Amino acid sequence: MNEVLQQFLNPEIISKVWLYLLKGLGTTALLSLMVVPLGLASGLAVAALWSLRRRWLNGLLIVYVDFFRAFPPLVLLLFIYFGLPFIGIEIPAIVAVAIGFLLNTSSYYGEIFRAGIESVPRGQWEAARSTGLSWAQTMINVVVPQATRNVLPDLISNTLEVVKLTTLASVVAIPELLNAARNAQALTYNATPIVLAALMYLVLLWPVVRLISRLEHKAVAVR
Amino acid sequence: MELDRLAFTFFNAEIAREYWPDIAKGFFVTLQLGLATIAAGLALGLALAMARSFQMRVVNWTIVLFADVLRALPPLMVIIIFFFAFPYAGMPMNAFTATWLSLSLVLAAFSEEIFWAGIVSIPKGQYEAARSTGMSAWQTLLNVILPQAVRLTIPPLTNRTIAITKGTALGSVVALAEILGSAHSASSLAGNPTPLTLGAIAYLLLFIPFVLFGRWVETRFAWKR
């Protein structure tokens, strides 16, 4: 038992690395703060374009969304980060992460917002337009608030997925939490940093998982 | 940049000819990993949901704990735990096993929650009616509750399964020779990103049919209330 503790929860190593890991956690938080609003905005844009109901546009959107939902995000990230320099475009890792995550999350959030917008009764559109509101005003003031309320559980669930996705940034050497844990583990020859990082993720994300669980049960029951 | 240079860089025929066998090998590893993950993950998830339906408090708490932890942790973190931390406990495992185990457990956690939500949404009357015709609890579960519950949950289930199977790419982080791993090393070796393009095509060849299959399963078997 003591051996297990030495290998997995070594107090000495914890005291040495916890600040380093905390910095990693901060980077994870910053990454999330960057990626989630970008994803939400682009997803909303995709859904808004869809609601214009132009056949050629919808065809393009379907291809876009299906492509980026089928394509693994890690492959996309590495393609952008390692492939682009070959044609002369050097981009810093963080920009590659931003672009890759934007493409991926815009398709997931786009689908969610699209379902939300379609769930708003057509009568709302017609009533709003007939009072003189423009298309944009209708979207912003009438449709999107209702749509968002309808799909809030899915939005929260997907946001959790996006936060978990930030671990992929460690592959392009961005110093977020998982990266810090792996570095610390390599330096100390001990699994404690990994266990510590796992605990940090749990503390951060467990409450959200509980919340989603509550909402999920309601959603399936209503169907 | 001119179209020629783009083609030469990303679609170089010579380099493609040289490296496509590696990508093909990676394709089969990814395929095996994906199928193994789905089989183990869904089976375990269903088993856990069924266990939960017997309403034993300790069992329920353990299952909920398991599901919560594995849904909260990023999949890459779970792979790292199994690959880098378990050897310190005397349980070293190779990249394939670590990736398969992690992804299966994560899929089991998500699918257990999805199956459970389905089981819970079946009206209590179904259970009572079945029991009152003389069926045991097991028979009720297998013949009445599960067929309905599973069909209700097919849309979220196919979605989640596809999402987690894309996680097979994460195996490349622990040097598993699946598509991304082989494509990336081939690219570095060749000094040209064409193998990465081949890898991307391989992924599309694998996942587009997968997504379409999921859609077909949905339209064929799912119930919409």
Image (cartoon, helix red, strand yellow):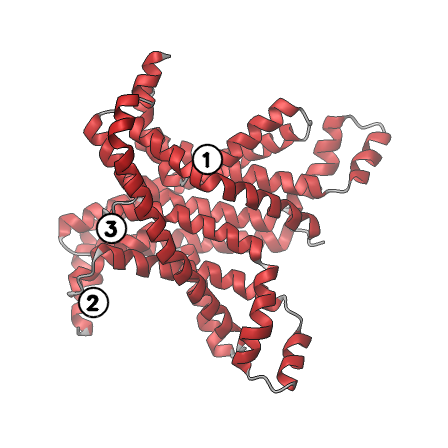
Mark 3, Cα crowd under 10 Å, few <14 / some 14-19 / many 20+, is some
Q: Which mark is residue B104?
A: 1
| Coordinates of residue B160 in the picture (x, y in percent) | 51, 47
Q: Residue at x 69, y 48 (%)?
A: A221
Quadrant in which the N terminus of chain B is drawn: bottom left
Q: Which residue is mark 3?
A: B20
Q: Is residue A109 left or right of residue B11?
A: right
Using the numbered discs, state the Cα–Cα distance from disc 3 to disc 1 in whole angstroms.
Answer: 29 Å
Same-chain check, marks 3 and 2: yes
**In the depicted view, which residue is nearer to us: A207 or B195?**
A207
Q: Quadrant of the C terminus of chain B?
A: bottom right
Q: Secondary structure at mark 1?
A: helix
Q: Earlier in the sequence, mark 2 or mark 1?
A: 2
- Residue A213 visible in the shown view: yes
Residue A198 in picture, x, y percent from top left: 38, 34
Callout 3: chain? B
